[in-house]
Image (cartoon, coloured by chain):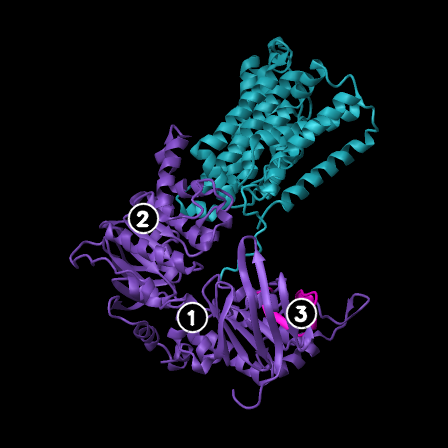
Chain colours: A cyan, B purple
Amino acid sequence: MTATAPARAGTTGVNVPALVRHYAVLIMLVALFVVLSVSTSSFLTLTNLLNILNQNAPLAIIAVAGTLVVICGGFDLSTGAIFSVANVVAAWVAVHLGSPVLGLLAAPLAGAALGLVNGVAITRLRIHSFLATLASSLVYGGLAVLITGGFLISVPAAGFTALGRGGIGPVYYAIIILAVFALLSGFLLNRTAFGRYVLSVGGNAEAAELSGIRVNRIRLYTFLYSGLAAGIAAAIGVSRIGTGQPQAGDGLQLLAIAAVILGGTSIYGGVGAIWRSVCGVYLLALIDNGFDILNANPFFKDLTTGVVILAAVALSVASRRR
Amino acid sequence: MGGPAPAVAATVRELSVRFGSTQALDSVSLSLFEGEVHGLVGENGAGKSTLGKVIGGLYQPDSGELEVFGRAVQRWDTRRAQDAGVVIIAQELCLVPALTVAENVFLGREHRTFGVLHRDLDARYRELEKLCGFGLPADAPVQSLPIADQQKVEIMRALARDARIIVMDEPTSSLTADESERLHEIMRWLRERGTTVVYVTHFLDDVLANCDRVTVMRDGRVIRTAPAAQETKAGLVEAMLGEPADMLLPERPPAPPPDTPPVAEMRDVHAGAVSGVSLRVRPGEIVGLAGLVGSGRTEIARALFGCDRIGSGEVLFRGEPVTDASPRASIARGMAMIPEDRRAQGLVLLRPVLENVTLPHLRRFTRAGVLSRGAERAAVRELIERLGVRPAALDGDIAVYSGGNQQKVLFAKWLLGRPELLILDEPTRGVDVGAKSRIYQLIVEIAAAGTGILLISSELEEVAGLSHRVHLVRGGSIVGEVPGPGTSVDEILQRLFEVDEPAETSREGRP
């Protein structure tokens, strides 16, 4: 007898926990936005807002792809290390082949290749993605140092910084790339068969398998996509400073996952949304920016961020029905 | 039992429990005597498990009274229940797999000083073992024991808590016949000691053979409580369903002529628990697999569908050998399977009805990978209306649908692909009576339209009443075949057990 556990989900159409999960991040983001706008004069300026958007665009790109990974039931802890490898590869290619364009193109390719390696390791060796990418992030981190010999690679060519510093009018390319990538990913998730498979595999891998879906292939693609995103982010990042650094991506992976979780994407897979992860990134960014412009004690910055993430995860767990 | 009026161990008065919109228990009253084995039977969803769980402290009643050994219960949870001498053994056993038998038995009841354990565990265990005589090794990790022995650990654990009322929720559902019989012996032994056993089960023969009294439930209400000696199986079924059982079964479609080439065939297939299975399903034919739980029925279906790799032998589909067995390839050929465990294997509970139905067929609704949602919605809307899924909402939250409606959604999922072979593994498990008769109708309609059906069910009435031919499965092999029409459940049972040691037949031992 399947004893139905006390069903908490309401019988009416309105599902309050789901609403909280869907819109909590947006509400927090708007609230913080309003508070900062009212309390300081330097926040609500076009320059400051564009700067915040621009600076966090690489992180947001990683979080967008990371959302697909998490929805599919995985974790990618190697995006920071992939970012590092891809950014030194870009600089290396730009210097050694003398072509800034090839250099910037090499970053997404390198990222996708490393993402593919992750995907193969996870599906072929059947290692949980959390462990597999934890290990691969160490390998990739080492690889980045090996490529540079531990030094920085400066790219003197002028064209190299166009991607990171230029834009259309006042809007940086990075913001445009993020917008396009996020829209594309949202389309992929919601309007394509692939997206449906990602949601199903994350929701119930066995049911997906029995429905004829190549579960492992779908998982692999999500990691490939995540690597690609880290590579794109790295191209923007390295172009911005004109220097390849082997530690450039350190810590990005945790911020990206934090943003995805803030966005209410379930860490158990099966549900989530791209736009909410982007909101998550910018919620983190506004907390950061707020501390700066309010001249608040920066010692409390990490503490605040951590508490916000904790609260978001607690909400997500509380709203998850059995 | 007879004799003087027995002492009352627990009394339930006008107890009600509500889950969301479902009235799980509706003003239920019942008394349990000391030293009786009391059967609780009913359809899935009738409330028998819920009642057991309320008595055991897992669920809190919304209203009504519970009296245990003469004391009215106020707040009630498993801890308080245990203190009052009531222990529930849930269907899914709650043991710590890595701990030893003795550690599990005394878990939470360790003697300790400032948190440091006394080293008396073995001595205490030996004492308890003297009482029970189960012969389980004290220091074996529980995970190394078969389920039946793990159940004994649960019973010892109950006894270590001085349980005077033990609620067993479907304890035999994963036991072999032999193991079930041993559990029944333990129940009798518990009864001798004066312990009350509440036996929640859907095996009516077991209830009739082992219980002193039986309570029948339907739709959250108690229909009647009577001495088991006065009950018959047919009477119980009728009380459970509210109508005679055979009313539910539709007429089966005409069998295909015997010279029709089979749509699917297994030839001497060995795979894991499957040993040497050969069978054929013709188009439009309903072939039943009858066997007890654990006999290998599901494994045969899984091997046919390509879930499990085949060691030797051959699977043929439409006469062609299958060389690339996988669920994906099977689906592409025109097979479909509704698996045993609807929630774990069939549905993606987090996704809405629509997405569950179209999951295997997305290619039909995409152009260059992009979904055409209009076409998808139109196809599914038509289908769920035809099958009578309630609520008939494309975006409905499948997780809160009733078992019957979840099952209809799974039928919709596979009917969308018009399969040539449909494997149904326990299609009516956990399904209410109304949905059950709709599903029977569906099975017959699907077969009449030319689809071959392989039907697995623990409810032998169902297999016998729907199938054209029934294969008898024991120990992963097919041990015989009987025609569906004209074969009674008792005959099937006899055939299933005749190759067995005579001792084991006592499980279904009533005439």
Asked whether, in this view, residue B478 is left or right of residue A140, the answer is left
Residue A237 percent across, percent down from the top left: 64, 21
Q: Quadrant of residue A214?
A: top left
Q: Secondary structure at mark 1?
A: helix
Tell me where the magenta segment starts and ends, as one range: B73-94
The amino acid beneath tag 3 is: Ala
Vertical placement of B64 versus A206: above or below?
A: below
Q: Secondary structure at mark 2?
A: strand
Q: Quadrant of residue B353?
A: top left
Q: Earlier in the sequence, mark 3 or mark 2?
A: 3
Task: Tell me if residue B322 can be seen.
Answer: yes
**Residue B239: image tag:** 1
1 vs 2, front mark? 1
Q: For the point 69% across and 66% down, which residue is it?
A: B79
Q: Nearer the viewer, residue B55 or B129?
A: B55
Residue B44 percent across, percent down from the top left: 46, 62
Within 10 Å of disc 2 (Cα), the crowding (few <14, some 14-19, many 20+) is: many
Q: Earlier in the sequence, mark 1 or mark 2?
A: 1
Q: Chain of mark 1?
A: B
Vertical placement of B284 versus A143: above or below?
A: below
**Disc 3/disc 1 C-alpha distance (Å):** 31 Å
Residue B440 percent across, percent down from the top left: 33, 57
The amino acid beneath tag 2 is: Met
Q: Are marks 1 and 2 on the same chain?
A: yes
Which residue is disc 3 drawn over?
B81
The amino acid beneath tag 1 is: Ala
